[in-house]
Amino acid sequence: MLTTKTSLRQQLLLWLLLPQLVYCLAGAVLFFSVTLFYANRVIDSRLAETAEALSELSQTQGTDLDALAPIVVQETAFRFYSISNKNGDVLHGNLSLKAPTDEYVQEIYSSSAPSFFDTTINNEAFRVAAINTQFANKEPVLIQVAFNLNLRNLYARQILISTALPLALLIIVTCFLVWWGIGRGLRPLAQLQSLMEHRKAQDLSPLSLQDAPQELQGLSSALNHLLSGTEESINRQRRFIADAAHQLRTPLAGLKSQTELAMRESSPEGLRERLNMVHTSATRSIHLVNQLLTLARSEPGSQTGIPKVQMDLAKIIRDLTAELVPRALAARIDLGCDCFVPTANMHGNSALLREMFINLVENAIKYIPRDGSITVRLTEDAHNYIVDVEDNGLGIPDADKARVFERFYRREQTGNGCGLGMSIVKEIVERHAGTVELLDAQPHGLIVHVVLPKTDLPA
């Protein structure tokens, strides 16, 4: 098994060269087997021809084979013959080639054609062709012609060696070509590595690979997408920090000025007035900091730190409406709740959703005229829960509805708002895979229309 430390080049070399090696070895074995097969066929054919020639000679010459048989069979160390009677006595030829064992005798005598078998003579392997016939005097005899297989094996080894040398050369050439091809194929990866190693950490520009293969183009595209998302996230954080610093500078500077004036005040009434102004500035600063922290928690980059659980959206809305009724009454606002869904189970973060609905209701309380009314309404369709926060105030012009969700944007400079409430609402809704939009109420007023899916994937 390959370890995780094995390089890609080594893996490619292994899986490309290993089949080539197996293929060459299998080809050599197959070639050797085919060579032996056809060599055996040639040997059997020659032995059969010689045995049949001796059979014809014995039928015409009888027992007078002393002069003619050696002419038919040129005996050498690799080939010789024998003619034996039914008792197994050798009448002519080599005395070492005796009658076959009983397992071959029945097959030989049952057929007029030559029979073939392998035997061992003096610890050497021989191929034997045997045929039964009779002399001219009608005496039955058994003719055997043997061929020493050592000669065949010698020739086969020579053929194998002569075949193995070109195969070995072919393997070497193949290894070199595969090694060169892998190096050339992996060159774009080396180019990508070089680009990443020489790139500064602050450089998030897209990668540019020339003549990259299709697979590496996909990797390059994925990296460029990641770099683009990272750059966008960093730019968003930079804008957030810059905006937060700008927004915090004003109330903190005002707080510092108020404390300096309070330190110079000598009368109790003047000191009390200054302290009230310090308290107001501190309260506004605390509200701004809390809004900034909520916005930071609700951003997509912080999803891993905000768990989502199964919760009842209807209960959250009913409870929050009840909690905010005293604040609405203090502002002479009629706050009501219409939950047409008894139980609204969904997957979400209850803390963020509570913050979202608090912002919606508090914004309506701040900006609608006194003696107005606010209604929080919960409905549903087949796939979503729908929350509408409707008021009968002056509403928002269509040209400003999109800008309301921008950070630190305030249509009116009155009040203690910091322009983050609707930005927080949008971030929290998007965190729950929902949508939010502003609609006109009839005959006048504004509806914040929030759609939350019933089944939301965990963050």
Image: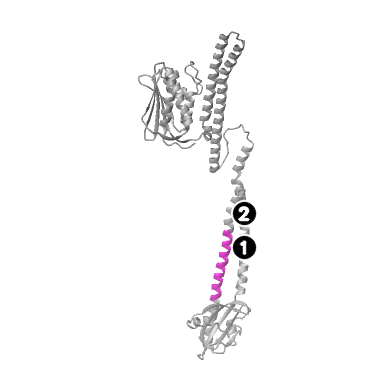
Image-quadrant location for residue 117: bottom right
Query: What's the magenta bit mostly, secondary-structure-wise?
Result: helix
Which mark sits nearer the N-terminus, 2 or 1?
1
**Front-lying residue, 291 or 351:** 351
**Bounds of the magenta span?**
22-44
Task: Give the image location of residue 132, x and y in percent.
Answer: 51, 84
Amino acid type indicated by mark 2? Cys
Front one among 86 and 73 = 86
Q: Residue at x 58, y 60 (%)?
A: 24
Residue 396: in sight, yes or no? Answer: no
Is 324 or 421 nearer to us in this picture? Answer: 324
Which mark, residue 164? 1
Name the residue at 62% across, 63% down: 164
Q: Is residue 317 a member of the stretch shown in magenta?
A: no
**Residue 332, horizontal then vertical, whole percent:** 41, 17
Secondary structure of the residue carrying numbered label 1? helix
Farthest residue, direction top: 267
Give the residue pinned by disc 2.
Answer: 175
